Image (tube, rainbow, N blue to C red):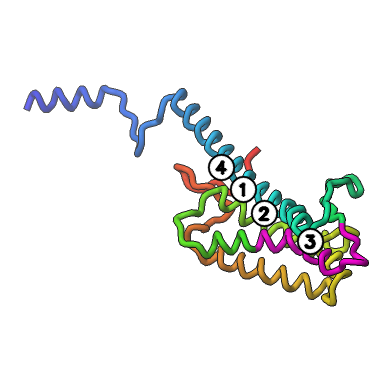
Amino acid sequence: MCVGLLGAALVAASPVTMSAQPEPPAAARQLYVARQASDSDDYWRRFAFGFAASILAHESAHAISSLVMGFHPYYALDHGRPTVFSGIDSDKHPRQQFIFSAAGLTTQAMINEAILDIPHGGGGPIERGLLAGGIGTTLFYITLGRNGSVSDVSVMARTSSLSKTQLSLIFGGFSAIQAWRISRYPRYAHFFARPTDGGLAIGFSY
């Protein structure tokens, strides 16, 4: 009885902090925040790498298609923008020019199809960057970049019987289907969100 009373008195006299989880030391909190920032930077760095790889594949496909057909592609600036030119006289060789202009978007669509069709675990940031690069490039060419003088869609329309609207529907349709498939695959859930220990980090960090 006396021991119990003494114990109760000691407990009552002791400072007690009621908390579901103990508060980590300041140094531990700083380390945790720094690790989260590092993880986020690494995630978006790999995502950007995948996006850039898709763009590189697009431009490389243009150059390779020209070389395979026996022409000499070259790089130059068009209104300050680096551009791959085919080295093809489109008046004499409209079919070859069409193949050159279609090669970039076609290659990106094929890369995305391969990613979506070939069974694998996947779903990582580089893979997501590749998918986003392909869909994003197509979206640009069928909207803002549709009417440029060296736009892929514009040149394809000039060298074929297809209109810019028809070409936009063809390539845009592929990308729309791919975007729908991505939305249906669990491994691509929260496509632009990065998992963290405390939930999800959505968007880009600065």
Label 3, label 2: how many angstroms apart (C-alpha)? 20 Å
Q: Tell me the SS state at disc 4.
A: helix
Q: What residue type is labelled 4?
A: Tyr
Front residue of this view, candidates 172 and 188: 172
Which numbered disc, 4 or 2, marks the residue that appears first in the sequence?
Answer: 4
Q: Which amino acid does label 2 sit on?
A: Gly
Quick check: 138 left or right of 14? right
Question: Residue 23: where, in percent of width, then height?
Answer: 40, 30
Name which residue lies at 92% across and 48% down.
79
Q: Which mark is residue 50?
A: 1
Q: Tell me whether circle 1 and circle 2 mark residues in contact (CB < 8 Å).
A: yes
Question: Mark 4 highlights which residue?
Answer: 43
Question: Mark 2 highlights which residue?
Answer: 133
In the image as oriented, which residue stretches furthest toward the front? 70
Which SS does the magenta portion mostly show? helix
Question: Mark 3 highlights which residue?
Answer: 100
